[in-house]
Amino acid sequence: MKERKHDKLPNQDLLHQQPLTVVPLGEYTSELSEVPHSHDAYMLMLVQETKGGDNLIDFRRYALEAGRIFFVRPGQAHQRQSRQEQGILVSFSEKFLQTTGTSAHEVLMLFGSLYQHPYLDLPPQLQHTVEQLAHLMEMELQKPLPDWSILLRYLYILLRYLLHESVQVIKQLTPTRHSERLFQLSHLVEEHFREHRPITFYADALAITPKHLNSLCRQYLNTTVADMQHERLLLESKRLLYFSSLSVKEIAFELGFEDASYFVRFFRRLTSTTPMQFRAGGAESTMLVAQNPAS
């Protein structure tokens, strides 16, 4: 395995200095496509045809299935193991996304990792609508002077359709009054996981008791607040081990651990391997096959 000397994931340029791009999935290839990398943009990957490939997102493996649309946000570890897929890639910048007026909570619903489920399986009619909107964007982008106000509206409409479907899926898993609170918790964990906060910190921020908060997590997410923090710490440690040249001691410090030995015990407890073994063996040694949380 090649020595990793860079301090962050290699970045795949999806935008080419544009705020929005639309390209066929089967035609989009680069030297980074099938190795772990990050993106400079938000990405919607609609799979129309496939022969059994996989999408690897943050060290979890998801099957590439026809009618499935994936949501990948900037900074995530991504790798596509292609099997001659056909589909559509819609990519857009953070600034362009903000211009659509989509709220932070709505972005979290689509691109967050609360349910470990970074995709939607689209009903046929919705897939057809998504394909039509992507085609309209592609046609506009092919003009010598694309009208970005039109493209902005196309993207907004596309995201609204996907949000509506996402809400319906989430409602099957969690009542709305609880899902909003759990999304808030997910956002707080993302902001504070390096600080190793106690559950009381999150419960106070959400104005509920620690017991009630953990009860919601167990009932609807099959986890606890502590486990959510541990999973986020583990993900970040894997990213740093695999894609940076930081020492184990430096990574432990970066992630708020008191000392390296404590970090090594933490990592081994969750992965059954040591940080150095993971770094030497690569991500495949601890790759998780993701399960559909609705099943």
Image (cartoon, rainbow, N blue to C red):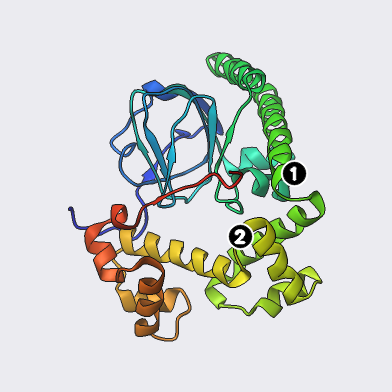
Residue type indicated by callout 2 = Asn
Q: Earlier in the sequence, mark 1 or mark 2?
A: 1
Q: Secondary structure at mark 1?
A: helix
Tell me, yes or no, if residue 185 can be seen here.
no
Residue at (37, 66) in percent of width and height: 271
Q: Is residue 225 above or below residue 36?
A: below
Q: Is residue 181 left or right of residue 117?
A: right
Task: Read off the residue under disc 1.
Answer: 171
Q: Residues within 10 Å of mark 1 (few under 14, many from 20)?
A: some
Q: Is residue 79 above or below residue 124?
A: below
Q: Quadrant of residue 227?
A: bottom right
Q: Residues within 10 Å of mark 2 (few under 14, many from 20)?
A: few
Q: Is residue 16 above or below residue 39?
A: above
Cα separation, mark 1 vs mark 2, equals 16 Å
Residue at (44, 41) in percent of width and height: 62
Q: Point out residue 153 in the picture as x, y percentages from the top left corner.
A: 71, 26
